[in-house]
Image (spheres, rainbow, N blue to C red):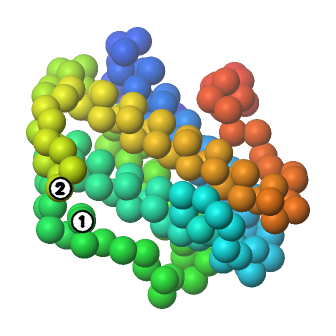
């Protein structure tokens, strides 16, 4: 994760690694903040893509796991598609799982060589099939999480919670990378 890269990276590798580390950092900021909020707010239903903060976080985690399996070329479509929300997880387990999964993803990504980042990877889903460079899939996954973090902030505002942390990429760069 953050600051654990030991090999010399190209600017391209650094950019992709920073983006994955940013995703980890932003998800951790969000989860740490949400942990201070009443549990009933985390499950309160609000009209959105996913109807609660918990469901949105679980979707983010599951999607990151899906794309990590694609990146590793370990995709098992039957298991991925049939996955649903793990409603048995406690709220703290949901927070821990999104943070842990984001950290694993960042660790894997920061160890890719430039050749591995540009390597074409096959994706097969019930909705589409594609062959794309690994770095494009990483960008997609990180953007997906950013999109849903924004939805979570909107959900919290609708619940009367207005003290969200700043999680913009530039804020990460300034705060973490200095």
- Rounded to the nearest whole Å, what is the CA distance between mark 2 and mark 1? 8 Å
Q: Is residue 89 above or below residue 25?
A: below
Q: Residues within 10 Å of mark 2 (few under 14, many from 20)?
A: few
Q: Where residue 160 sits: x, y (%)?
A: 87, 62
Q: Give whichever of discs 2 and 1 has the lower sequence position.
A: 1
Quadrant occupied by the C terminus: top right
Q: Residue at x 48, y 31 (%)?
A: 19
Which residue appears at 67% of the width and 24% of the height?
Answer: 170
Q: Which residue is most to the bottom?
A: 88
Q: Is residue 142 left or right of residue 76?
A: right
SS assignment at label 2: loop
Q: Is residue 154 above or below residue 116?
A: below
Front position in the image: 52 or 7: 52
Residue located 72% across and 51% down the image: 153
Whether residue 111 is visible, yes or no, is: no
Number of numbered tags placed on the structure image:
2
Image coords of residue 161 (percent x, y): 85, 60
Residue 51 left/right relative to 82: right
Nearer mark to the viewer, of 2 and 1: 2
Q: Which residue is mark 2?
A: 126
The residue singled out by tag 1 in the image is: 81
* Res 128 seen here: yes
Location of residue 150 by image quarter: top right
User: Do labels 2 and 1 touch, CB within 8 Å?
Assistant: yes
């Amino acid at each position: 994760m953050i600051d654990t890269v030991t090999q010399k990276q190209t600017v391209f590798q650094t950019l992709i690694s920073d983006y994955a580390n940013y995703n980890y950092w932003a998800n951790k900021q969000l989860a740490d903040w949400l942990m201070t909020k009443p549990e009933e707010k985390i499950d309160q239903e609000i009209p959105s893509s996913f109807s609660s903060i918990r469901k949105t976080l679980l979707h983010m985690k599951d999607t990151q796991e899906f794309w990590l399996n694609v990146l590793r070329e370990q995709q098992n479509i039957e298991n991925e598609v049939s996955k649903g929300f793990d409603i048995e997880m406690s709220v703290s387990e949901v927070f821990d799982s999104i943070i842990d999964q984001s950290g694993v993803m960042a660790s894997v990504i920061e160890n890719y060589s430039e050749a591995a980042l540009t390597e074409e990877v096959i994706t097969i889903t019930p909705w589409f099939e594609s062959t794309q460079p690994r770095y494009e899939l990483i960008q997609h996954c990180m953007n997906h999480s950013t999109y849903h973090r924004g939805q979570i902030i909107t959900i919290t505002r609708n619940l009367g919670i207005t003290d969200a942390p700043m999680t913009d990429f530039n804020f990460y760069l300034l705060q973490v990378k200095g």
